[in-house]
Amino acid sequence: MNGIVHPGRGDRLWRGIIIGTPYVWLLLFFLAPFAIVLKISFADPIVAQPPFTPFFDWSASAGQRILATLDNYRFLLEDNLYLVSYLNSIKIALVSTALCLLLGFPMAYAIARTPQPWRNLLLLLVILPFWTSFLLRIYALMVMMGQHGLVNDLLLSLGVIDQPLAMLYTNGAVYLGIVYSYLPFMILPLYASLEKLDHDVHEAAADLGAKPTQVFFDITLPMAVPGIIAGSLLVFIPALGEYVIPALLGGLDTLMIGHTLYDEFFVNRDWPLACAVAILLLLILILPIVLFQHFQQEADA
Amino acid sequence: MTTPGNTLNTLNTTDTPNPEFINTPWRDPQQRPFIEIEGLSKRFGDFIAVDAVNLKIYRRELFTILGGSGCGKTTLLRMLAGFEKPSAGRIRIDGVDVTDLPPYLRPVNMMFQSYAVFPHMTVYQNIAYGLKKEKLPRAEIKERVGRMLELVQLTALSKRKPNQLSGGQRQRVALARALIKQPKVLLLDEPLAALDKKLREQTQFELMNIQDKLGITFVVVTHDQEEAMTLASRIAVMDAGDFVQIGTPSEVYEFPRNHFVASFFGSINLFDATVTSVDAGELCVLLDDSDTEICTRYEGELAVGSACKIGVRPEKLLISTERPAEQGNTITRGVVEDLAYKGNRSIYRVRAQNGRIIMVSAQNKQRSAHLPLEWDDEVYLSWPSDCSVVLTA
């Protein structure tokens, strides 16, 4: 490489490329679509192709005009459906995150404390479900939970129940689907922070008079906080906007914002309203991320 | 020697330290040991880390366990702390059997080699942790932590987090945290290994001062023989899970039981010798390249005519161009093959007549820009015969 022979200019060029690439990427694939969605959210729906009014009105006799309306956002706040969808999504995402944390923490801790050859195998088992299609795994859950699914058949043949349990198309099925799908995203960051934990620190606490439960709450838990935050965000954020799981496993009463957004977009073909739903969802998501950043900075300081 | 298992291969009985010396409870059979270890073993699968050791440590001792890596010294310490369950044997501290007690119920605290300070707590919180677990009143905790911070000179840094401290400061946090519970025994695992040389030497004396001030029994594990020598009231030299020799620093240095102990503490020159007579614990040998006969007390079993080795420390040897006086000296000859001037002393590598290299460490007492000896000089090597030690293994 030239950059090695002539450090000055080549180095700067390389640095520029390396730093610039992610920014260009974000600009092209995040900021630009976001700007488009934002623009559409201020438009009115019309029956046309594309199905919304333009942002700039070039044709008008009064010169250039910006045709922006807040009607969509007003509508979001007026119609109860959206508020219920948002709140329900937040509730389902929060509860799923908590369940993932409760399940994932002991698993991550056990993996971090397992001696080496086995540890890699256990990690592999955590990642293994990713090797099959996400949709296939959700369909598999449907097969298991259906009216005449594996679980009901088994319980019936064992005589535990007289008639099939209604498992599929309930909120419970949605929780199960989300926890099952996102558990690895909780386990991996938790494992990363627990694995770094020096075992001496636990022994030091025990040596200073802490009983095993006290060692956990005084030492293990506080030191795993970065992993807990990272894992919770990784579960909470996708779970909040989840569409496939509530659509396939949820019932009619399972209102989640991802599903509502889909309906606005593809069923009602109201693109502007769907975009407003998406923008509001993004605003809700930014809040935990800003909090996370704040915690990170505090931890580093 | 009254301590069992501590007989020394001394050449001259007058050289053994005075048994009346007050600071040596291990010489007094009336003294009750503070820590008693009986037949303590630890097996990891097929590997025997600690092999049925017995040890008595007395109140206020600064006892050092010395050995190379994998000799079992850390495992022994961890059994004292309660982190490892012994495969066999008992541990008693101040008359109480603690063998089956978990770490948090033992009157023992440990300072870890990694220091293991809590990274998410400040210096103050680290030191106060042990007292908080005792549920002491807040005012008392504050007062005691304050005093401890003063003792280890960390008062100004009490609000800092460990990642804002230097290695030496972290070490003092670890020490203060372990000392604040006023344990009956403080266990220290390689306490100074992570410090640089200068700080290590300074901290050695600080440790000794703190031990003296608080009167706590210290058990130190180290692989550094210099550290062991400086700190210890007694040293237990450990190898392959068992003690090779237990004694004061001067005992293990001047009267090593075998070659392993001798070479662990600095270097030692070995001379071939032949046993000429054995009589009631006294052994006489003839050095193979000298006509001097050395007689020494020796409790091992050696037959007349069998070969053995005589060990002499480099600083006990006198190097000269003129033949020294015969009286009480062992004399041999050689040629200076190499020399290293080190300021306060010079190291000579002398090739003896049988081809073996002998190391001599000579104090440079005279002030001179010229070396008293040069390469290829023919020299006499001599040492007081009672500085020789018979070494078998």
Image (cartoon, rainbow, N blue to C red):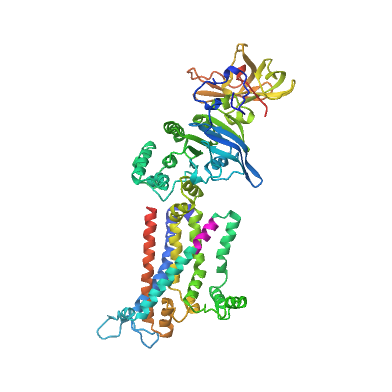
The answer to whether residue A294 of the structure is visible from this angle is yes
Q: Main secondary structure of the magenta part?
A: helix
Residue in the foreground of this view, choosing between B94 and A291? B94
Q: Position of residue B318 (x, y in %)?
A: 58, 18
The answer to whether residue B382 of the structure is visible from this angle is no
Q: Give the quadrant of residue B381.
A: top right
Q: Residue at x 52, y 79 (%)?
A: A166
Q: Give the quadrant of residue A148.
A: bottom right
Above-or-below relation of A230 to B15: below
Q: Position of residue B45 (x, y in %)?
A: 65, 47
Above-or-below relation of A121 to B162: below
Q: Position of residue A225 (x, y in %)?
A: 43, 57
Quadrant of the image for the N terminus of chain B?
Answer: top right
Q: Give the quadrant of residue A124.
A: bottom right
What residue span does the magenta drawing correspond to?
A103-112
Q: Is residue A61 left or right of residue B87?
A: left
Residue A104 sits inside the magenta stretch? yes
Above-or-below relation of A49 to A36: below
